[in-house]
Image (cartoon, rainbow, N blue to C red):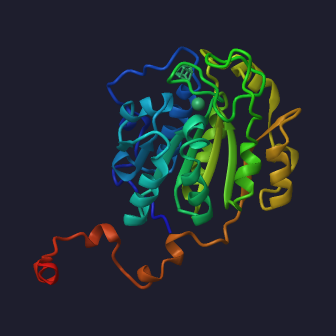
Amino acid sequence: MTRIPLDNTGGPKMADYHHKNQCTWCDGCGDYGIWTAVKRALVELGIPPHGVLLCYDVGCHGNMSDKLQGYRFHGLHGRVLPFASGAKLANPVLPVLAHGGDGASFSEGIGHLVHSIRSNYPIVFILHNNANYGLTTGQASSLTWQGQPMNTSPNGIPEHTLNSMDFVFSLEPTFVARGFSGHIDQMVQILKAAIQHNGFAFVDMLQACPTYNQFATHEWLMEHVYDAAAEGHDPTDFAQARRIATDTSKRISTGILYQNTAAPSFYDRLKPREGRSTFAVDEVQKVDVTEYMKEFL
Ligand code: SF4
Ligand code: MG
């Protein structure tokens, strides 16, 4: 049901998203690629900066929040999804993109992720997956490979690594994709499809972190990722999608791995919104509650 607002001046350009603030990411950080892909996807869909809400969690990726134009929100650690989904429900014609890191999203924010997927909120969630807490200087996250020495676990983590994709598929998602921060063209195609998906679009972006991730480096990812579509993958096949998403033992599948276009979104299921020509954001008003309060005086 997303109506993408079109720019009537010939369409937005990359320069429209330009911000004077300079990036502060380390040299070689995968955030540069994801930042570029997000802007390109929005421009190619004809979405101007005033026609999108960009939400950020706390983390290195969150430093993007003042490095591009658009309506932007920078929230608390692990809490980006409640804000993003609430904003979308208030104004369902506004494209909403939520960014979160692997640390927050698969630890303190994991409850929000569970309910966002099962609710099928019609938003895009971009997981900046660098397999560590980069902003706080390289601690292990739930997605750090077991046995990898990290700054606060020099002998490797004792816990086993969470299989994030198996976990996501267990929640019956309606859109799952995986990109790599070094493949900008593919990320753009993934993000354009995710923005147009009527439901919760989970986009796992494998992101190089040359400062703290010495195992899944940019070069290692380059050697191990493959385009699932090029090998004939059918993204409507849930079982096959789950299998190729989960098994990363030899190679890592990328692209749109699964999409169900038939499932209604959370908003489509809201009975109180049926038949309404306005959205909640149009209905905000001051209400005099004096009469109701008299009962308690
Ligand atoms: Fe990027 Fe890692 Fe540096 Fe953070 S610590 S800016 S994720 S390279
Ligand atoms: Mg991280």
Toward the viewer: 247 or 282? 247
Q: Estimate the x, y position of residue 91 in percent, counting from the top left.
A: 38, 64
Quadrant (top left, top right, bottom left, bottom right) of the C terminus: bottom left
Left of 153 or right of it: where is 35?
left
Residue 233 seen anywhere in this rendered image of the structure = no
Toward the viewer: 240 or 228? 240
Q: Is residue 256 above or below residue 161?
A: below
Toward the viewer: 174 or 287? 287
Instruction: Residue at 34% x, 24% y: name it.
Output: 21
Instruction: Residue at 50% x, 24% y: name it.
Output: 135
Return the residue found at the far front. Answer: 297
Ligand 2: image quarter: top right
Q: Estimate the x, y position of residue 71 in percent, counting from the top left.
A: 34, 46
Left of 297 or right of it: where is 247?
right
Instruction: Residue at 33% x, 70% y: name it.
Output: 280
User: In this figure, what is the number of numbered marks?
Assistant: 0
Residue 133 seen anywhere in this rendered image of the structure = yes
> Could you say which quadrant of the image residue 199 lies in?
bottom right
Q: Estimate the x, y position of residue 261 in percent, counting from the top left.
A: 67, 67
Q: Is residue 262 above or below residue 185?
A: below
Q: Is residue 248 above or below residue 92?
A: above
Toward the viewer: 178 or 100? 100
> Could you say which quadrant of the image residue 72 lies in?
top left
Left of 227 or right of it: where is 262?
left
Instruction: Residue at 57% x, 27% y: name it.
Output: 133
Q: Estimate the x, y position of residue 62 in percent, counting from the top left.
A: 45, 33
